[in-house]
Amino acid sequence: MASLADISRRAGVSIATASRVLNGSSHPVSDVTRDRVLAAADELGYRPSVLARALVKRTSRIIGVIVGDIVDPYFAEIARGVADVAARAGHLTMVCNADRRPTSELAHLDVLRDYHAAGVVFAGSGYEDLHDAEALRHAVDALQAGGSAVVALAARDLDCPSVLVDNRAAARDAAEHLLELGHRRIAFVEGPAGLHTSAHRLEGFEAAMAAAGAEPIRVPGGFEYEAGAAAAERLMAAGELPDAVLAVNDEVAIGMLTALRRGGVDVPGRVSVAGIDDTRPARLVDLTSVSLPLHELGESGARVILEGEAGDVVLPHRLVARGTTAGRG
Amino acid sequence: MASLADISRRAGVSIATASRVLNGSSHPVSDVTRDRVLAAADELGYRPSVLARALVKRTSRIIGVIVGDIVDPYFAEIARGVADVAARAGHLTMVCNADRRPTSELAHLDVLRDYHAAGVVFAGSGYEDLHDAEALRHAVDALQAGGSAVVALAARDLDCPSVLVDNRAAARDAAEHLLELGHRRIAFVEGPAGLHTSAHRLEGFEAAMAAAGAEPIRVPGGFEYEAGAAAAERLMAAGELPDAVLAVNDEVAIGMLTALRRGGVDVPGRVSVAGIDDTRPARLVDLTSVSLPLHELGESGARVILEGEAGDVVLPHRLVARGTTAGRG
DNA sequence: TTGTAGGCGTTATCAT
DNA sequence: ATGATAACGCCTACAA
């Protein structure tokens, strides 16, 4: 609460001088005055007002991360990546939970703009056919016009740099792994409808199947455990189980795996199961998955904001074969 | 970017008047001028500057939630609870990841203070013997002196209201469930050392065991999957398996469960496994657990900040018996 | 090298 | 009912 005025008074200098030494200005200041100011600031426990500073400089050291679901480990890992480099640069990162609702994203963007955020990171994928698409683009424009940097870490119809992973290739690699193990009847548990990521992963799967001349089986799903479990029930109820199943993400794969085993189905003996993302739970249950550089994604995102690093990059992924996939008996 | 000055000019009124109608002041304003101002604001797309406002009012509509680990579903659920009621009141909630490091907590508290946060919620437990305890208390004092409300959702050595769950009772209930099933040799996988929550849950377990005249077995652990898996390995390597194991939380229980089954141990046939928290993954793997009102905890926390609701409350929990615990064959 | 002064966008006090 | 105007705390030309 000690302000620059307090410091200047105590140090016997003008506010301007105090300001100059206290904010690393390049403006020359004699060593003696500098020391006096520093001493005064120290004694009074001076803390610059970020509010006042943001008001005049029109930018703050805040980075917003818009995530689709804060409980999803996928986003949590990305958020940590952002926070790590942001913190190192003295920036604060705030994780905003959009609950996969565009209107909620919009609300967060407004707030971020209000606070003159240094930048905002879109961690999740956008919707293919979006009613609020226009509004979203406007919000992003406004943000950028206000000096905030914007970066997307997944496919979005936004005019901003991006750091991505190749979801089609990731799904294709997983499918090919299953095919190489000798499986032909492979089911794909789809993600939420309308999401780019869902569509891309499905495309990758179908491409691999088509190339192998195998018949793809599609099962509706989602992004959460329950969806995987429900898909498993459906598969088991249908009587004829597939040789293998690839899920749109790890959570769904684990839901599938668990329900299958609970239903007495031997995994990987009878059916192989694989996921995508390679989040922490995947490693726990020894799930075959495609490892995505989630943390790096976040780090890179923060860097394009903080250091103006070039965007439009695609980071590499790699398949990690574990205990839930095996060759045909 | 349209400021009050712009509006007042366009509406042909003073800045003061424009301000009065635009911020729901109780100061009387004639209907005609009000309409003119409203119209001008609308045409110019006026948005009040939260920064300027916070600067003069010395308070902002930000609520900070300090979590120990953003990947932990326990915290995610609490954060959602806070965000839900905060959003309804037009407040923004920012989730701050402290990585279970007091120094990190301190840093976040500083920022929150800088922004004159309306309040801060400590979602996680404090440390029993903390080097930074003094600093933390100071930070909280400063926060409160600055007008921010503070509330703790777990045991902390802080001078602030709290909304809690009874961790001792929760662990005791779980242990009693195991005892009632006829188990005698029960192991407890402990949480991270030095954390209040860890200590309380251990106490509850030991109290139940003592009351039943059973010999408690303690196994070091942590809060994550890996700790549970490691504990399982240790147990299996030791040769003689316990009848049942209670883990300090669900993640550890699931790590235990998975490792046990992978090691060929029948759960719950040979050994029963239970956790505490009842987070989403627990329901997935059909884990017996103690259900804590995590979301409500967050909601209540937000309410004591927003509505000055009385603190120092203890919310009820309840045991949920599922498929990982069974009576002795 | 140091100081003066205007401005950032609001709110609030005091006149009118 | 309306309007000046002084804060709030800081930065930054422009002067000296």
Image: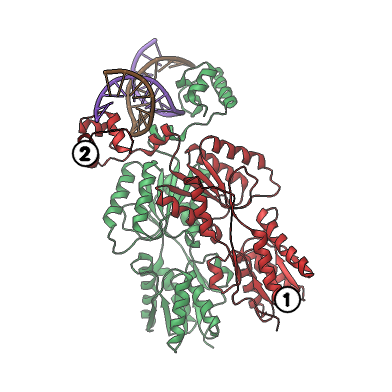
Chain colours: A red, B green, C purple, D brown
* For residue A20, side relative to residue B37 (left or right): left
* Vertical position of residue A60 compared to residue B130: above or below: above
Q: Secondary structure at mark 2?
A: helix
| Residue drawn 67% across the image and 75% down it | A272
Q: Upstream in the sequence, badge 2 or badge 1?
A: 2
Residue A43 occupies quadrant: top left
- A21 to A323, vertically: above or below: above
Mark number, residue A221: none
Q: Amino acid at mark 2?
A: Asp
Callouts 2 and 1 close, C-beta under 8 Å: no
Instruction: Return the chain for callout 2.
Output: A
The disc label shown at residue A35, or none:
2
Check disc 2: other Cα within 10 Å, few if <14, some if 14-19, many if 20+: some
Picture residue at 43% right of the left edge, 82% below the top: B234
Above or below, B102 against B234 in this view is above
Q: Position of residue B287 (x, y in %)?
A: 54, 73
Residue underneath mark 1: A183
Q: Can residue A60 be seen by looking at this rendering?
A: yes
Say which amino acid is labelled 1. His
Residue A116: x and y in percent read 48, 38
